[in-house]
Image (cartoon, rainbow, N blue to C red):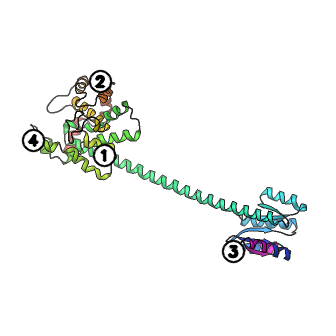
């Protein structure tokens, strides 16, 4: 079966041309022949698919060089093998160094010719593989860049939607405006004190904190804003907001930390919380962290049923509930910062929020 790799053999001597052609055909190469350099140039110009050229026989050096330069000018990737004799060795070496030819084979030495041809075809195959690999690499890099750009754009949209959603939720209740953003910051600070330094995990904790009360969207204002005590039935509806929130957002495939905060942020360390009465380390770490952050903001913020307390008061109250409502390790992490430091964190997280009057105007427009 003939090889798909076609060789053009240029040799003015008929017998030598016939013998060399027969030898190459026996090695499964497809061979085209020419008896002169001029005809060879014309043949190459009209015949596509020639993979390699072998120049044998005695040709004037100037004519050969002109032919070689002409071929290289329009078929630069075409390998050229030149038969060389001791008399033409210096010229052949010079052309080899200049890149005018690619291989030199001893005149009449079939072994060296076959070796040169094999090497050139192997080199050509490697070049093609390299070019193909490079194209694939560049395509993958482009696809990766496009995917990254899309991911970043989606992340920006997601974050904006999340912030807007929680602002809309906060606007339902004037008294808790900014609560989600504040507890998100507290949760991240506590996480870092506890040794969580992975940026992705910290951001997931931030997102879960912002979304923790999203289930309250499904709670009627008549219950959520009721000025007096809640009935047993109303209280049971309020207690369902973690499951409602988790159900609302689980279809968008949020990561584990986000879902854990939404679903378990009212669980208590001693197992008296809700919805599942989880105890100690059954409660995910991020949920235990958030529970303390949530309480810190509740104690130090104004509520209709009581005035806001100082951070020193919050430190004392949270410490008293160590081991009951809160994980002792997280309480100690909280206590590692002084009350004035927590107060500064609160200020930094809320200083960009609108003032009370502006927030009331936003509520009237909502």
Q: Are marks 4 and 3 in contact (CB under 8 Å)?
A: no
Residue at 33 percent of width and 48 percent of height? 254
First to last magenta residue range: 20-40
Instruction: Give the quadrant of residue 171.
Output: top left
- The answer to whether residue 203 is left or right of residue 173 is right
The residue under label 1 is 162
Q: Earlier in the sequence, mark 1 or mark 4?
A: 1
Q: Say if residue 215 shows up in the picture.
A: yes
Q: Quadrant of residue 236?
A: top left
Asked if the magenta segment contains residue 38, the reply would be: yes
Q: Which residue is mark 4?
A: 232
Residue 230 at what x, y percent from top left?
A: 10, 39
Q: Secondary structure at mark 2?
A: helix
Marks 4 and 2, how far apart at CA: 37 Å
The residue carrying pointer 4 sits among few (fewer than 14), some (14 to 19) or many (20 or more) residues within 10 Å by Cα, namely: few
Mark 2, residue position: 339
Q: Which mark is residue 187?
A: none
Mark 4 → mark 3, Cα distance in angstroms: 90 Å
In the image, residue 118 sits, relative to residue 279, either above or below, namely: below
For marks 2 and 3, give the one nearer the viewer: 3
Q: Secondary structure at mark 1?
A: helix
Find residue 32 and report its horizontal and vertical position in percent.
75, 75
Q: Earlier in the sequence, mark 2 or mark 3?
A: 3
Q: Is residue 363 magenta?
A: no
Q: Earlier in the sequence, mark 3 or mark 1?
A: 3
Mark 1 touching mark 4, by CB under 8 A? no
SS class of the residue under badge 4?
helix
Q: From the top left corner, tell me how far across and down residue 247 is, in percent.
A: 24, 50
Residue 365 appearing in the image: no
User: Which mark is in front, 3 or 1?
Assistant: 3
What element does badge 3 sit on?
loop
């Amino acid at each position: 079966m003939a090889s798909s790799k076609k060789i053009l053999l240029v040799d003015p001597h008929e017998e030598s041309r016939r013998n060399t052609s027969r030898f190459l055909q026996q090695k499964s190469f497809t061979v085209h022949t020419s008896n002169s350099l001029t005809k060879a140039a014309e043949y190459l110009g009209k015949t596509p698919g020639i993979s390699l050229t072998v120049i044998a026989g005695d040709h004037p050096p100037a004519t050969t060089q002109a032919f070689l330069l002409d071929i290289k000018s329009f078929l630069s990737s075409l390998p050229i093998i030149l038969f060389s004799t001791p008399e033409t060795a210096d010229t052949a070496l010079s052309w080899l160094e200049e890149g005018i030819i690619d291989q030199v084979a001893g005149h009449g030495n079939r072994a060296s010719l076959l070796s040169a041809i094999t090497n050139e075809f192997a080199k050509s195959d490697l070049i093609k593989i390299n070019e193909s690999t490079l194209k694939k690499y560049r395509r993958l890099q482009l696809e990766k860049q496009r995917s990254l750009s899309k991911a970043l754009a989606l992340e920006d949209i997601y974050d904006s939607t999340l912030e807007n959603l929680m602002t809309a939720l906060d606007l339902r209740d004037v008294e808790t405006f900014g609560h989600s953003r504040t507890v998100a910051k507290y949760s991240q600070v506590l996480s870092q004190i506890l040794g969580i330094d992975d940026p992705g995990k910290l951001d997931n904790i931030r997102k879960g904190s912002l979304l923790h009360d999203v289930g309250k969207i499904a709670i009627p204002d008549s219950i959520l804003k009721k000025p007096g005590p809640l009935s047993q039935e109303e209280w049971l509806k309020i207690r369902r907001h973690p499951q409602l929130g988790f159900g609302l957002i689980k279809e968008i495939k949020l990561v584990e930390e986000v879902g854990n905060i939404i679903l378990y942020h009212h669980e208590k360390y001693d197992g008296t919380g809700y919805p599942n009465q989880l105890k100690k380390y059954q409660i995910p770490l991020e949920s235990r962290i958030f529970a303390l952050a949530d309480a810190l903001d509740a104690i130090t913020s104004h509520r209709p049923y009581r005035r806001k307390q100082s951070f020193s008061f919050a430190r004392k109250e949270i410490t008293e509930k160590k081991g009951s409502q809160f994980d002792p390790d997280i309480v100690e992490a909280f206590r590692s910062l002084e009350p004035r430091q927590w107060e500064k964190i609160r200020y930094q997280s809320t200083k960009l929020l609108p003032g009370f009057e502006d927030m009331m105007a936003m509520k009237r427009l909502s």
